Amino acid sequence: MANVAIRFGIIGCAEIARKVSRAITLAPNAKLAAVGSQSHEMATQFVAENNFPSDAKIYGSYEAVLDDPNVDAVYVPLPTSLHVRWAVLAAQKKKHLLLEKPVALNAVEFDAIVEACESNGVQFMDGTMWMHNVVVVVVVVVVVVVAAAVVVVVVGEL
């Protein structure tokens, strides 16, 4: 595969998008191409507060991000109740998807998202990357070791 950066668009300026956008800008094979919010002012503020690349486009709507031909994939940190609508639309516009968790409210919505991705030839990934983190292995080991003990509180941060 060629060393081509995936151009990401973000629809929505949720707090979690700050962390994910930072990861996108640090990844050598990804580029932050566009951000859209419910208003141009909100998107502009989000871009300024998060030190996005100067060439990242700023849009006052989610649709504009999906219509941008320079966006290959879309990160969706919107409330779960909005996922099916925007994920299906993104897939129909041939945008690959990174959906924040939980992906859908129920199995019917999840099936609609998967069907839209399959029928439009786009990839889909959910935001449960913590499951693949080495910290999870450590937690499992600790739980096994202290299985006989009573755990009162577990506090962690990834």
Image: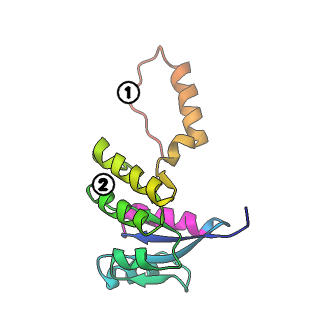
Magenta-drawn stretch contains 111: no
Amino acid carrying label 1: it is Val
The residue indicated by pointer 2 is 80
**Where is residue 82 shown, x and y percent of the image?**
28, 60
- Mark 1 or mark 2, which is nearer the start of the sequence? 2
Q: Residue furthest top?
A: 148
The residue indicated by pointer 1 is 152
Residue visible at 46% across and 60% down in the picture: 120
Query: Could you tell whether 8 is left or right of 91 in the image?
Result: right
Residue visible at 50% across and 79% down in the picture: 69
Up the image or down, 98 lies above or below 37; here it is: above
- What is the secondary structure assignment of the residue under circle 2? helix
- What is the secondary structure assignment of the residue under circle 1? loop
Q: CA distance from mark 2 to mark 1?
A: 31 Å
**Where is residue 75 shown, x and y percent of the image?**
45, 64
Up the image or down, 64 lies above or below 119; here it is: below
* Residue interval drawn in magenta: 13-25
